[in-house]
């Protein structure tokens, strides 16, 4: 058995998976892997990138279709993070998305200027997709903090605009200040300019009233943006983001939310199953990573799992809620980033495990239907759909 397979076997024992699915180790030995972004139309070349991931303290990794890990960019932070949790060690380089037409990679991060922490989004390009060749600023000068409430997810909508989640920077009231970008979801052109059809044609602000909207994902069935937001002591939430809406913070985390956890779970990334990676009965289900308590070891009372939600069309209600992946090991491992790729659901484990005294660092895993489930679906096109009934 190869060294990778031996390590994979040890690590996978620490996770409990939803029936009908298997877990695979994709990459290991990473340094705080945060979020994942897939190449929308990957090349047929096995050495070309399949997905990118941010590492919190200033690196971006590219993972090829054959599983090789490359350092796409490093040294992106102009300050040196220190590991205090809660505090300085919680922030850095987080959000990432890939531009479909060009393959350019958008990143969100903190930077220091004259002793003040600020947030920015940059656009990077690469000739081969494996190493960054150039970088330019899209938007910057957003006041921030190193205490986690920073600039977060970046996504490209169905309208081809760039959407940016910005936390309140620890200044709660700024989430309601229309002249301030903190506590908002922003909408802009890919060069940072303001689209003519924004709610306010003089502002990038799309919606307001957010505390710490870590994750973001687009739902094909309604064409809308969904976010996962972290609450204070109560009421982490999920919300459908619409223009001009006020999502309540700091008065409440429940306003215009369709689901919340009264007992906080620290939701991070989220994504919809909408391109046939799982059997059709999971179509349009929402998967959310619940990180839990930072550096908490062992099974979590809070978080340390991925949950699956079935929504109605509005959504005004959740039809079902299930644990999908649950950590049962002894380390500080916990899901953080999450995204559907062409062949399954991928997630990052920020901290990783200590296997036989050897630190592996953070990991990336893939969840996919197992052979038994696929065999059961063969010949049942009426129930499961044609794509899942072929031999």
Image (cartoon, grey):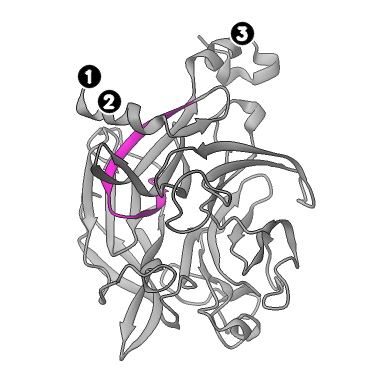
Mark 1 vs mark 3, foreground winner is 1
Residue 223 in percent (x, y) is at 64, 52
**Which span is picked out in magenta?**
22-39
Q: Which residue is mark 2?
A: 5
Residues tagged 1 and 3 counted as in contact (Cβ below 8 A): no
> Hey, which residue is sitting farthest bottom in the picture?
114
148 in relation to 321, above or below: below
Return the disc, 2 or 3, that comes first in the chain's sequence.
2
Instruction: Mark 2: give few (<14), some (14-19) or many (20+) Cα within 10 Å.
Output: few
Q: Which residue is mark 1?
A: 1
183 left or right of 319 in image = left
384 in relation to 335, above or below: above
344 left or right of 211 in image = left
Q: Main secondary structure of the magenta part?
A: strand
Q: Would you say residue 103 is visible in this rendering? A: no
Of residues 182 and 252, the one drawn nearer to the viewer in this rendering: 252
316 in relation to 330, above or below: below
104 in relation to 305, above or below: below
Of residues 231 and 207, the one drawn nearer to the viewer in this rendering: 231
Q: Is residue 213 magenta?
A: no
């Amino acid at each position: 058995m190869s060294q990778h397979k031996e390590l994979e076997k040890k690590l996978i024992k620490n996770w409990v998976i939803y029936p009908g699915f298997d877990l695979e180790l994709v990459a290991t030995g990473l340094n705080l892997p945060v979020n994942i972004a897939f190449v929308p139309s990957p090349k047929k070349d096995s050495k070309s990138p399949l997905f990118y991931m941010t590492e919190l303290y200033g690196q971006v990794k590219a993972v090829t279709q054959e599983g090789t890990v490359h350092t796409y960019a490093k040294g992106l932070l102009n300050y040196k993070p220190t590991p205090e949790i809660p505090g300085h060690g919680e922030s850095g380089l987080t959000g990432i998305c890939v531009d479909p037409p060009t393959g350019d990679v958008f990143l969100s991060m903190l930077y220091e200027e004259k002793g003040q922490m600020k947030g920015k989004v940059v656009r990077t390009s690469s000739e081969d997709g494996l190493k960054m060749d150039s970088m330019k600023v899209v938007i910057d000068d957003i006041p921030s903090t190193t205490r986690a409430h920073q600039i977060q997810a970046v996504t490209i909508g169905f309208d081809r605009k760039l959407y940016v989640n910005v936390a309140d920077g620890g200044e709660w009231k700024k989430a309601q200040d229309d002249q301030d970008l903190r506590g908002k979801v922003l909408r802009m052109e890919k060069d940072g300019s303001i689209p003519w059809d924004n709610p306010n044609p003089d502002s990038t602000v799309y919606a307001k009233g957010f505390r710490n909207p870590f994750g973001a994902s687009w739902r094909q069935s309604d064409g809308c943006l969904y976010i996962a937001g972290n609450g204070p002591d109560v009421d982490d939430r999920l919300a459908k983001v619409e223009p001009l809406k006020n999502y309540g913070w700091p008065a409440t985390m429940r306003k215009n939310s369709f689901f919340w956890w009264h007992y906080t779970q620290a939701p991070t990334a989220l994504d919809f199953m909408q391109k046939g990676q799982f059997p059709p009965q999971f179509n349009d289900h929402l998967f959310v990573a619940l990180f839990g308590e930072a550096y908490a070891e062992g099974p979590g009372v809070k978080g340390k799992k991925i949950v699956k939600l079935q929504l109605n069309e509005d959504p005004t209600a959740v039809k079902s809620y299930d644990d999908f992946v649950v950590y049962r090991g002894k380390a500080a491992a916990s899901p953080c980033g999450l995204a559907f790729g062409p062949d399954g659901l991928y997630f990052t484990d920020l901290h990783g495990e200590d296997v036989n005294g050897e630190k592996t660092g953070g990991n990336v895993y893939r969840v996919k239907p197992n052979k038994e489930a696929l065999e059961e679906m063969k010949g049942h096109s009426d129930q499961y759909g044609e794509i899942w009934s072929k031999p």
